[in-house]
Amino acid sequence: MSTRTFQFDPTEAPNLNALWTGLAFEEWSRLGLSLAVVCPGSRSAPLAYAISQNPRIQSIVVHDERAAGFVALGAARATGRAAVVVTTSGTAVANLLPAAIEAAKTGTPMLLVTADRPPELHDCGANQCIEQRGIFGTFSRWSIEVPCADCSIHPRWVLSTADEAWKRAHSPSRLAGPVHLNWMFREPLAPRMEAWDRGVASELTNWMKGRAPWRCEVGGVFDELFDEGSDAGQRSWDHMAVELVGRIADATRGARRVVLCVGALYSPAMRSLASCLATRLGSPVIADIGSGLRFGGAGIDVVAHADLIPLSAAVAKTLMPDFIVRLGGAISSRRVGEFLEQARRSGARELVIRDGPERSDPQHTAQLELSIDLSERPRINTRTASQESLAFDVSYAKAWRDADARIASVLESHLDDATDALDEPSTARIAVATCPTGSILLVGNSMPIRDADMHAASSESSLMVAVNRGASGIDGLIATAVGHARVTGKPTVALVGDLSLLHDLGSLAMVGAGSHPVVIIVVNNDGGGIFHFLPLADHPKLLEPWTTAPHGVNFAAAAEMFGIAYLVPETRGELTGGIKDALRRAVESNHSTMIEVRTNRQENFDFHRRLQSSVAAELDRFVRESETRSAEILR
């Protein structure tokens, strides 16, 4: 039956378990469920059955519960709507915790639906029975024990509870995150026909005939008028940005050297608002690679290489702001963080725009905070939004652009020769540059995100950048990329390190399945290369092997095992061509590819240092030239 003609009829449920689960998933499909991620199991069979019977629900079967949680995370990040994860009872539930933590830290909506044994099988030694209530602790926005299906409980309770779970997961945005429904089931777990009073569904007749949820939000976040991809939705964000600029103007009164620092962004709504705000504010934008603002952002004064600017103390001094506006999650660059801290010590004031569940102020320095709720967008009106930016120092913005351009010229001369051997900075730079407009790039933690943040150029190509920087773990990254690919159908590239791929090898089964191809670029330096850049590097006996954890493997056999095309480029040109070919295979034949870039950790550290020395020298030259020009003007 097609999704257009499908109409859910609760009276056709074979038993009460099927009735209850069918009601819940029908309600979530009406609310906008992005994806159902189903893990195999017996106790969860009624949940799987409900999903299998509803053609409006997009679904995927995942063997590993930990990976399943991250697939749901990626799907929600891409769409702004929750995905649901279904597991059986026991330790399967515990495997969802890493993804739940990441979702909680970033305000990502998620529904965790875990099957459980009935009350009479608890605390008596029954097989596969653990205490699942409250297992996600403070990381769950709401947790409820769904009792065994019972004819004495009216079915409308199920619909109302499904609505409440959805609302708790999504709104308000400052409290969005994972919601846990621990669902108890008695036999029959299979869709076996049993007698039940079908008259109890009689009050649901009007609901059955329509497509509206049981409990409708008046002017709610899912009003089609404000769909993220629509012109109306974009205008609503534009008007909110205008209001924010007005409030920022009040806070920054008297300031002339203002910077907007945008960290990682985790929802379509936040990305739209940040883009509008950056365009209208008229100040230099320090955009973390995870913000996505470096790409396709016409009209945004983006600084692509802010991480490298503090390499010159003289340039950093000339660019010191007197006011900082911060938006989004954590920034990847330690140097940018130190630069901002120096500005604060020099008297710069700071305003944090907060949309998440926790404060975004690790240095505890911000004395101004502006809280926003993305579930309460302004209604579109007929007035035209002001096109004027604030009266900041124009020469200050130009100085940022000039310094950024000098760095770009150094990176081009050191990283863009296609015949040179591959290194980690050029790998990140090529991966970003090769992603076409409309694609998705997931950047893994540790060195990949830092190399992309430092070395990737900004571009007019519009692409979605995905990161897991809430808890900054290296687990579940491939699964997160699969979640993005599955719900969007867009070409998806994942740039990860070798330890991240080892953590998530099981997710290659989904990558190789073919329905959601991913191009994986794995930088294999035989361990944790980032630790060579940290103070632990001064303690070599602790560095090797206790911290870097060398493994001595490559991923050729893993790619072959899961039917994934595989190549090992040696030059920058080969990597560029390999990514383009892999993306073409993904689009034309639904086939995934793994590209392994093999490097040496010590050589990588040395190359970074040489590159940074060249950048610092060019920036110092830039300062001297500026001083010479100023002296000539004065004469």
Image: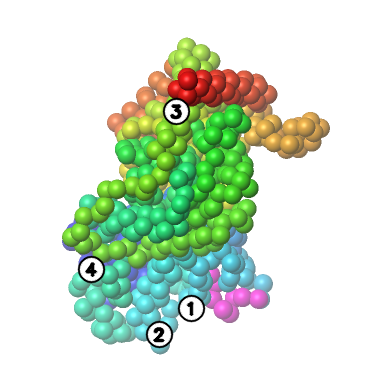
Nearest-to-viewer mark from 1 and 3:
3
- Crowding at label 4, few (<14), some or many (≥20) Cα neighbours within 10 Å? some
Residues 423 and 406: in front is 406
Of the two numbered discs 3 and 4 on the same chain, state the one appearing first in sequence.
4
Q: Amino acid at mark 4?
A: Arg
What segment carries the magenta color? 113-123
Point out the tag, 2 or 4, that comes first from the N-terminus.
2
Amino acid at dot 1: Pro
Verify CB contact (< 8 Å) between mark 2 and mark 4.
no
Q: Earlier in the sequence, mark 1 or mark 3?
A: 1
* Element type at mark 3: helix
**Residue at point 51%, 75% (across, down):** 145
Q: Which residue has dot 4 on it?
A: 211
Give x and y (percent) for residue 334. 60, 40
Q: Secondary structure at mark 1?
A: loop
Q: Secondary structure at mark 2?
A: loop
* Residue 385, quarter of the rendered image: bottom left
Q: Which residue is mark 1?
A: 147
Q: CA distance from mark 1 to mark 2?
A: 10 Å
Real-space Cα separation, disc 2 to disc 4, in angstroms: 24 Å
Q: Is residue 252 left or right of residue 233?
A: right
Q: Nearer the viewer, mark 1 or mark 4?
A: 4
Tell whether label 2 touches label 1 (CB within 8 Å): yes
Q: What number is the disc on residue 13?
A: none
Disc 3 to disc 2, how far (Cα)? Answer: 68 Å
Q: Which mark is in front, 3 or 4?
A: 3
Report, in whole angstroms, how far the alpha carbon at label 1 lies from the one at label 3. 64 Å
The residue at which mark 3 appears reads as 402
Crowd rating for badge 3 (residues with CA inside 10 Å; few <14, some 14–19, many 20+): some
